[in-house]
Image (cartoon, rainbow, N blue to C red):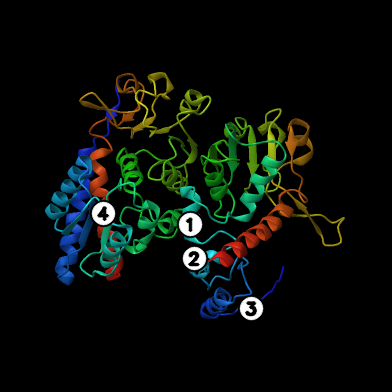
């Protein structure tokens, strides 16, 4: 796969970012464009994402692609939720008919994952609950889950007492936790208190090494799909 | 104690009062009036009666109103041309295509051809996609009506558990994202969900939009819940909802009847969206 990385300085203007995106939209060598988030405060994320050609939007965050996703129409699926779906299906835990509880309602994981898994479609068709910090008692919901997805961005937020025996646990969290034994001074931890939860779960993903590698892979998958689509057009 | 009724007419009337006030204020400032159009293909009697109602209500509220009546056998290209005309028409700030369309027409292609800034039905993918973020866009009229009904009860939504039965593009899916934005926990299920009764029993806000008569029994309702019945099924000569109303009203704190619940509000929300489109165009 041909790849270009375009680095813009933190003080680049919105105009400059839009111009860069425009150049990539028109570049026939490029099938997929990803704008790495977060962006500096002076640049509107909505504006920049909305400027990417929907056909090349391999992150799947352009509103027209999110709208198609919600409507159940063909579109590039956002990479992390798409990776979660693939992890479930390919580990023999098809979500059809299962109760999936998604903790966290971010625009990049929680909401699109819910939208993917509740569709009347293969590898989906689940009952989906989205729960977040607004809820009084998150464990009330997590204990009902056949499949529990932790995507809150808080280390060890899901503890063993919140999980029923036999639950499938997917940990999307990637948090830096201070650790003086490491050279970098920190280690990566998920949203799940891994060891005790692993004792009760039927399946569990580790952090690192769980969802992370899937996200990158789904980006490449979306790029291949986009290339096929663009060549047909 | 039986539940309070959420009366569609009352909710619609309070929205209409706001619309009239806004139209008056904008007219006084600018001398301009918003324009709304409905495209009707063929002679489907139910569609015809909807369209007549929309036209009547929009004129009454002070909109400029047009109905484009097109023959049943219109070609895809000719219909797309009408949509292009309306997209360009400066008198028209918002319009919708009445569904269902005759089978030879590609509904998805037609709805996607509508300028998203004039898509007052809120079904263009861009407007549905904007529901994921906090970007402003149009909300599908039925989902928007339900939100108004919930707000009408003056009960808090924050931290409550909402259960939505039915995952249609105009109710369940958009409403799930809207209620998440209002800080409810949201469960989306459907009429065939295993254990549906138990899931419903946990709902502080229960929205039934499955199109399955009498699906929700009284003992599926959590005491004190808000129950919104979106189901409308013709049974003999009457309309029947998804909720067993007589049982549920003894348990719920608020409940909407069928008919007389969601139905009367949806047309008003179309007018509301047309007003929003107008304000967006005027940049006010």
Please tell me the numbered disc located at residue B280.
Answer: none
Q: Quadrant of the N terminus of chain B?
A: top left
Question: Which residue in the protein does label 2 denote?
Answer: A46
Q: Do the dots labelled 2 and 4 sit on one chain?
A: no
Lower sequence index among marks 1 and 4:
1
Say which of A31 and B178 sits in front.
Answer: A31
The residue lying at 28 percent from left, 61 percent from top is B78
Question: Which residue in the protein does label 1 denote?
Answer: B133
Q: Quadrant of residue B33?
A: bottom left
Q: CA distance from mark 1 to mark 4?
A: 21 Å
Question: Which residue in the protein does label 3 denote?
Answer: A8
The residue lying at 49 percent from left, 65 percent from top is A46
Q: CA distance from mark 3 to mark 4?
A: 42 Å
Q: Does residue A177 lie above or below B217 as drawn? A: below
Please tell me the numbered disc located at residue B272.
Answer: 4
Pointer 2 indicates a residue of which chain?
Answer: A
Element type at marker 1? Answer: loop
How packed mark 4 is, by other alpha carbons closer than 10 Å (few <14, some 14-19, many 20 or more), is many
The residue lying at 38 percent from left, 27 percent from top is B224
Residue A206 visible, this orientation:
yes
């Amino acid at each position: 796969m041909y790849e270009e990385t375009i680095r813009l300085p933190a003080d680049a203007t919105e105009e400059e970012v839009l111009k860069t995106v425009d150049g990539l939209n028109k570049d026939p060598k490029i099938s997929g464009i990803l704008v790495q988030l977060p962006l500096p405060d002076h640049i509107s994320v909505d504006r920049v994402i909305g400027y990417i050609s929907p056909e090349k939007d391999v992150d799947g965050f352009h509103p027209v692609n999110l709208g198609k996703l919600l409507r159940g129409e063909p579109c590039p699926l956002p990479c992390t939720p798409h990776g979660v779906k693939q992890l479930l299906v390919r580990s023999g835990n098809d979500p059809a008919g299962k109760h999936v509880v998604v903790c966290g309602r971010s625009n990049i994981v929680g909401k699109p994952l819910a939208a993917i898994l509740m569709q009347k479609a293969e590898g989906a068709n689940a009952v989906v609950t989205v729960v977040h910090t607004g809820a009084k008692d998150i464990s009330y919901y997590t204990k009902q889950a056949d499949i529990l997805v932790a995507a809150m961005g808080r280390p060890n937020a899901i503890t063993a007492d919140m999980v029923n025996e036999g639950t499938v646990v997917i940990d999307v969290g990637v948090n830096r936790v201070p650790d003086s034994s490491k050279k970098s001074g920190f280690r990566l931890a998920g949203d799940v208190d891994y060891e005790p939860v692993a004792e009760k779960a039927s399946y569990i993903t580790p952090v690192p090494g769980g969802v992370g590698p899937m996200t990158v892979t789904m980006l490449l998958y979306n790029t291949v799909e986009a290339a096929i689509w663009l060549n047909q057009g | 104690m039986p539940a309070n009724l959420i009366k569609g007419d009352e909710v619609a009337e309070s929205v209409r009062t706001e619309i009239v006030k806004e139209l008056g204020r904008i007219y006084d400032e600018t001398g301009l009036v918003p324009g709304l159009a409905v495209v009707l293909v063929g002679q489907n009697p139910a569609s015809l009666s909807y369209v007549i109602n929309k036209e009547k209500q929009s004129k009454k509220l002070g909109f400029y109103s047009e109905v484009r009546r097109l023959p049943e056998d219109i070609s895809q290209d000719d219909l797309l041309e009408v949509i292009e005309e309306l997209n360009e028409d400066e008198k028209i700030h918002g319009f919708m295509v009445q569904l269902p369309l005759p089978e030879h027409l590609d509904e998805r292609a037609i709805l996607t051809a509508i300028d998203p800034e004039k898509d007052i039905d809120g079904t263009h993918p861009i407007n549905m996609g904007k529901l994921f973020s906090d970007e402003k866009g149009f909300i599908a009229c039925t989902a928007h009506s339900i939100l108004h009904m919930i707000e009408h009860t003056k009960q808090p939504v924050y931290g409550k558990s909402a259960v939505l039965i039915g995952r249609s593009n105009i109710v369940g899916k958009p409403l799930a994202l809207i209620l998440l934005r209002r800080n409810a926990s949201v469960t989306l299920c459907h009429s065939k969900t295993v254990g549906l009764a138990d899931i419903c029993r946990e709902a502080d806000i229960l929205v039934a939009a499955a199109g399955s008569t009498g699906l929700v029994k009284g003992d599926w309702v959590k005491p004190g819940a808000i129950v919104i019945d979106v189901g409308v099924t013709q049974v003999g000569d009457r309309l029947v909802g998804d909720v067993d109303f007589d049982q549920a009203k003894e348990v719920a704190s608020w409940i909407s009847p069928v008919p007389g619940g969601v139905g009367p509000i949806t047309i008003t929300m179309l007018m509301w969206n047309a007003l929003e489109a107008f304000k967006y165009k005027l940049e006010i």
